[in-house]
Amino acid sequence: DVFIGPFCIVEGTVEIKARTVLKSHVVVRGDTVIGEDNEIYQFASIGEVNQDLKYNGEATKTIIGNGNRIANNATLAGHVELDDFVIVGGMSAIHQFVIVGAHVMLGGGSMVSQDVPPYVMAQGNHARPFGVNLEGLKRRGFDKPTMHAIRNVYKMIYRSGKTLEEVLPEIEQIAETDSAISFFVEFFKRSTRGIIR
């Protein structure tokens, strides 16, 4: 059920899962896994050689989860991970080794060089957080108490004046009873580049 449109190039060790659509003129290379139900628009380039000057040809891997939308002229360097239900705006670039959490919305023209926590809206060069993707969460059926809890965790991370290390124990405690908050905890365990600020 995968659709690969005209003038797309898919080469290397690429795995594209069910119901994913490559519109046209999309390039997917290298060691890349694209999950289910993704839409990738014209002129997106995924899994290409790193643009980092320190890159010496070592193996890289790009992983894209399920239900993502990647707009035109987006570039994802190697070792990028997009979790489920991410929207990447056009003319955006994501640096190697960056992790973008579930339900994130990256505005057009974003240059992302650090990890983006789940549920966050971000934009800019370098990308900065500017709130929770509440509209996307509503569309995916999140209830008001869950969205309220997510917003509170966002405030703890970005508005409390505390470091991530200081607020993480409290987030972990909330995650014990709220599965939506566990996405934050799982994300921070994988994050190696620091988060956008």
Image: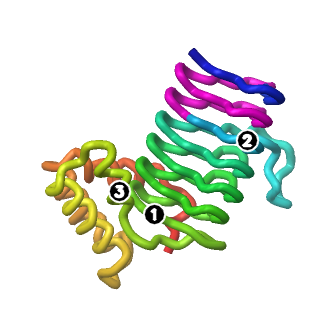
Mark 3 belongs to which amino acid?
Answer: Glu
> In which quadrant will I find the N terminus?
top right
Determine whether, in the image, residue 48 is placed left or right of residue 188: right
Q: What residue type is labelled 2?
A: Gln
Where residue 193 appears, as percent x and y from the top left, is: 57, 61
Q: How far apart are marks 1 and 2 (CA)?
A: 23 Å
Identify the mark nearer the N-term, 3 or 2.
2
Where is residue 178? Give x, y as percent. 18, 49
Residue in view at x 33 percent, y 80 percent: 159
Q: In this view, does 2 lie to the left or right of 47?
A: left
Residue 137 visible, this orientation: yes
Q: What label does residue 121 carry, if any?
A: 1
Range drawn in magenta: 11-38
Q: What residue type is labelled 1?
A: Met
Give the answer, above or below, for where 29 lies relative to 159: above
- Tell whether position 121 is magenta: no
Whether the magenta-drawn stretch holds residue 37 is answered as yes
Q: Verify CB contact (< 8 Å) between mark 3 and mark 2.
A: no
Tell me: residue 121, above or below residue 79: below
Label 2 residue SS: loop
Image depth: mark 3 or mark 1 in front: 3
User: Circle 3: is it few (<14), some (14-19), or many (20+) Cα within 10 Å?
Assistant: few
Residue indicated by mark 3: 135
**Residue drawn 64% across and 21% down?**
3
